[in-house]
Amino acid sequence: MEIKNTNHIYETELKASEKFAIWITDKIGTIGFFLVIFCWTFLWLGWNMFAPKTLQFDPYPAFVLWLFISNMIQIFLMPLLMVGQNLQAKRADIRAENDFNVNIKAEKEIITLLKEVKELKNMVAKLSQND
């Protein structure tokens, strides 16, 4: 039974679109992305609440443009996140299967070693009885 590099197996099977979905999932799941969205929201709402009326482009209290853009981001990112999470689960399954195979191989080798150690103990016991 050959021990395989699961990262290599997983990466060779991925299409470009799947790699993109995983990349998006990895980037969105960070505090950096949260801070970008938070700052964008804070600046957008703050500008449109406190800037001079002539410079406001998304009037308070509706913020219709902000809501539209936020909803579009959510609509596009949600399916990508789900695809990325499914692909990450597939990777975890491949890794778990490989770990299981490694454990089976290790168990077989340990059993063999235990048998050999038992045989050696018997041989040593016989030799010590002959002396």
Image: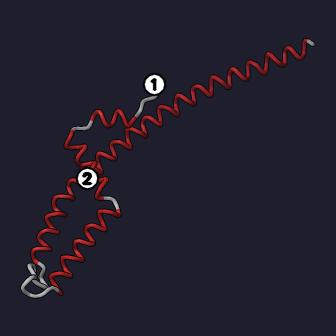
The location of residue 34, given as percent across then percent down, is: 30, 66
Q: Residue at x 13, y 79 (%)?
A: 63
Residue 17: image quadrant is: top left
Circle 1 SS class? loop
- Residue at the disc numbered 2: 24
Q: Amino acid at mark 2?
A: Ile
Q: Are marks 1 and 2 in contact (CB under 8 Å)?
A: no
Q: Nearer the viewer, residue 127 or 68?
A: 68
Residue 92: image quadrant is: top left
Classify 25 as above or below 127: below
Question: Looking at this rendering, what residue extends furthest in the right direction?
Answer: 131
Q: Quadrant of the C terminus?
A: top right
Q: Nearer the viewer, mark 1 or mark 2?
A: 2
The first of marks 1 and 2 along the sequence is: 1
- Residue at the disc numbered 1: 2
The location of residue 75, given as percent across then percent down, is: 16, 61
